[in-house]
C-alpha cells in the first residue's frame, strides 16, 4: 500500500474539517441529548437522534443509484489515506468527529475485507487511540452499498476506549480467539497487543488472518451473511447478526461498543425496560 497520509495529520485534519463543515452547513449532526443505561457493569450510552428526520428527508430525495461517496464532497473531504482509500466526514454524525474511510472506486460493502482494508484501519489507529468499525450490510446496520469503514474517537475517558471494554476485560481464550462470558450473543474476541510493534503491512496481514478465522467460525465468510466488526489498538471484536432492528431501533456496530441511538423518548423507554444487552442479543445471534 502506498501511503499518502502524513503521520500525525489525520485527527487535526478531521477537527479542522468538522469545524468548517459545521459552519457551512455541509455537516448535519443527528445526535442530541445523551443518557446512560447501566447493565452488568456496562454504562451504555444512549443518544436521542433529535435530527434523524432531517437525514431521512435528504435520503428520500436521492436517486436509487445515488452514491454519496462518488464524487467526493469537497466540503467533507479530510485526507488521502492510501492509493485505495480517502477519509471523509460522516455527513450525518451521531458522534463528534465521526469519519469514514471510503474506497476511491465503487466496491460493494458486502464483499469480504482484505489485508489492504486492515492496513488502512491500522494506519489510522496508529494516529491515536480510537474505535474503528464496519457494518457489513443493511442487516448489520449499514446504510450505503459503497465500501466504507468508520472511525470515531474514544467514547469514554481513561484507560478504556468504549463502554463494552468493561465486559471484554473478562474474556476467556482457547488459542488467539476467545469470548467474553458476560455478553449474551455470539461473538469472537482477540487481543492485539502483540501487533503494536509490527510494521503496518505485517500487522494488517495478521488482522486479516484473525478476521477470516472469526468469519469462518460463524459462516460469515460469504457475502450476504451479516456481521459487525469492531477494532481498537487493543482488540478486535466480531459479531454475527440476525437482524437490523430491536423494536424499531436500528443497531449497528456502535451498539456492540456500548453506544446506541434512539429516535425519541418512547424508544428510550423501551430500551431501558428491555435492557441494552437483551436488545443486542435479539439483533445478534443468541449465545
Image (cartoon, helix red, strand yellow):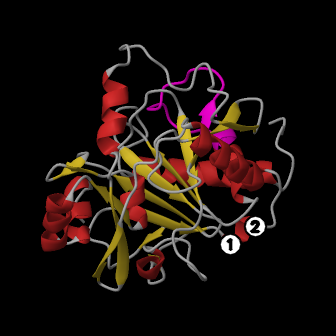
Mark 2–mark 1 contact, CB under 8 Å? yes
Residues 137 and 153: in front is 153
Residue with the most extreme right position: 6
Residue 239: image location, x then y, percent: 38, 56
Q: What element carries label 1?
A: helix
Counting the numbered discs, the total is 2
Q: How crowded is mark 2: few (under 14 residues within 10 Å), some or many (20 or more)?
A: few
Quarter occupied by the N terminus: top right
Q: What secondary structure predominates along the stretch shown in magenta? A: loop
Residue 144: image location, x then y, percent: 43, 31
The magenta segment: 101-117
**Residue 100 visible, this orientation:** no
Residue 204: image location, x then y, percent: 70, 50
**Residue 241 visible, this orientation:** yes
**Residue drawn at (30%, 49%) of the image:** 241
Residues 33 and 162: in front is 33
Q: In the shown orientation, is residue 199 left or right of residue 170?
A: right
Q: Residues within 10 Å of mark 1 (few under 14, many from 20)?
A: few
**Residue drawn at (84%, 37%) of the image:** 4
**Residue drawn at (56%, 26%) of the image:** 69
Q: Residue at label 1?
A: 193
Q: Does the magenta stretch include residue 91?
A: no
Q: Is mark 2 on a helix, strand or loop?
A: loop
Amino acid at each position: 500500500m502506498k501511503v499518502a497520509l502524513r503521520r500525525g495529520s489525520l485527527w487535526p485534519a478531521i477537527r479542522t474539517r468538522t469545524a468548517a463543515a459545521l459552519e457551512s452547513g455541509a455537516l448535519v449532526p443527528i445526535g442530541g441529548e445523551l443518557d446512560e443505561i447501566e447493565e452488568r457493569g456496562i454504562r451504555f450510552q444512549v443518544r436521542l437522534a433529535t435530527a434523524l428526520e432531517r437525514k431521512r428527508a435528504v435520503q428520500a430525495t436521492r436517486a436509487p443509484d445515488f452514491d454519496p461517496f462518488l464524487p467526493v464532497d469537497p466540503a467533507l473531504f479530510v485526507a488521502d489515506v492510501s492509493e485505495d482509500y480517502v477519509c471523509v466526514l460522516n455527513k450525518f454524525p451521531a458522534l463528534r468527529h465521526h469519519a469514514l474511510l471510503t474506497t476511491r472506486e465503487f466496491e460493494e460493502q458486502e464483499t469480504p475485507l482484505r489485508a489492504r482494508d486492515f492496513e488502512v484501519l491500522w494506519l489510522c489507529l496508529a494516529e491515536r487511540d480510537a474505535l474503528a468499525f464496519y457494518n457489513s450490510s443493511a442487516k448489520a446496520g449499514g446504510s450505503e452499498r459503497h465500501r466504507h469503514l468508520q472511525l470515531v474517537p474514544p467514547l469514554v475517558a481513561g484507560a478504556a476506549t468504549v463502554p463494552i471494554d468493561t465486559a471484554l476485560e473478562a474474556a476467556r481464550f482457547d488459542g488467539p480467539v476467545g469470548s467474553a462470558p458476560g455478553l449474551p450473543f455470539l461473538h469472537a474476541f482477540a487481543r492485539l497487543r502483540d501487533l503494536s510493534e509490527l510494521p503496518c503491512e505485517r500487522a494488517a496481514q495478521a488482522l486479516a488472518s484473525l478476521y477470516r478465522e472469526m468469519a469462518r467460525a460463524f459462516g460469515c465468510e460469504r457475502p450476504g451473511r451479516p456481521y459487525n466488526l469492531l477494532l481498537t489498538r487493543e482488540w478486535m471484536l466480531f459479531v454475527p447478526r440476525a437482524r437490523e432492528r430491536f423494536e424499531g431501533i436500528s443497531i449497528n456496530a456502535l451498539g456492540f461498543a456500548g453506544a446506541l441511538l434512539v429516535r425519541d423518548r418512547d424508544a428510550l423507554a423501551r430500551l431501558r425496560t428491555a435492557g441494552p444487552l437483551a436488545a443486542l442479543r435479539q439483533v445478534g445471534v443468541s449465545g
